[in-house]
Structure formats: structure tokens, C-alpha cells
Amino acid sequence: QVQLVESGGGLVQAGGSLRLSCAASGRIFGLNVMGWYRQVAGKQRELAASITSGGGTNYADSVKGRFTISRDNVKNMVYLQMNSLKPDDTAVYYCQANVVVSPLGSRRDYWGQGTQVTVSS
């Protein structure tokens, strides 16, 4: 089994910063793409940022220039540094990882439980 545990959410004023962390643990033979998604109640979950095992990154237009995703392949961690936060960034943020779960290379997607980020105006 694989677990993803997020931390770092909270309440911040507009213009402030937060750093989210996600730790992957369990029976892991490798980690491929990792990402941060966010979801507002009643709306579809959307990608905020993703990063490949080689460090290639992808960002939603709405967060480009404000958010930075990074990872530590030794510690099996992924981070999201969020700067210049806006009330529209308020959402539950979910960590996602594509995990190699067997020596033969089988892959499976896993999700964390989510962490609330609230940005007040």
C-alpha cells in the first residue's frame, strides 16, 4: 500500500504565502509524475501544477509566476510554494502521484486526503 500525506495548508491573507508538502510512503518502487490539484466545493478538481521525475514542470495558467512545484526524489516528497495568494486560490489541495508499485513496473495513481487552503481578502 502507498500513502500520500499532505501538510502545510491553512488560513492566510491575500498577498501572503504558504508552502504545501506531500510525503509518499509505503511499497514504492519509483515515483513518476507528481502533482498538486485543487478543488472548490461544487466544482471539478483541477490541476494546479505537476512535476516529472526529471524535474519538468507544468502549471495552470492561473498560478503561473506565483506557484512553484518541486520534489525531493530521495525523500519521496513533493512541495508547492504558493506566493502572492489570492482569494480565488481558496480550495482543498490534493497531492497526486503516479507510483511504480512492483518490480515489473506496474503503475498506479494515488491521492492524498487533501489540505484546506483559505485566502482571506
Image (cartoon, helix red, strand yellow):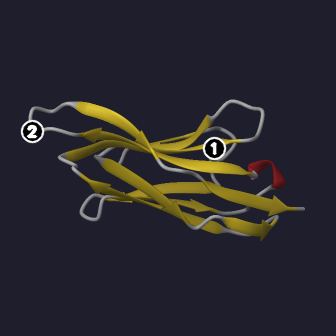
Residue depicted at 47% across the width and 44% down the height: 35
Q: Position of residue 25 (x, y in %)?
A: 30, 57
Q: Are marks 2 and 1 in contact (CB under 8 Å)?
A: no
Q: Is residue 6 left or right of residue 53?
A: right
Residue depicted at 21% across the width and 40% down the height: 101
Q: Quadrant of residue 38?
A: top right
Question: Tag 2: residue type?
Answer: Pro
Residue depicted at 17% across the width and 46% down the height: 29
Q: CA distance from mark 2 to mark 1?
A: 31 Å
- The foreground one among 57 and 44 is 44
Q: SS at mark 2? A: loop
Q: Earlier in the sequence, mark 2 or mark 1?
A: 1
Q: Which mark is residue 38?
A: 1
Residue depicted at 9% across the width and 32% down the height: 104
Can residue 51 be seen at all in this image of the molecule? no
Question: Tag 1: residue type?
Answer: Arg
Can residue 118 be seen at all in this image of the molecule? yes
Q: Position of residue 8 (x, y in %)?
A: 58, 67
Q: Which mark is residue 103?
A: 2
Most distant residue in the right direction: 121
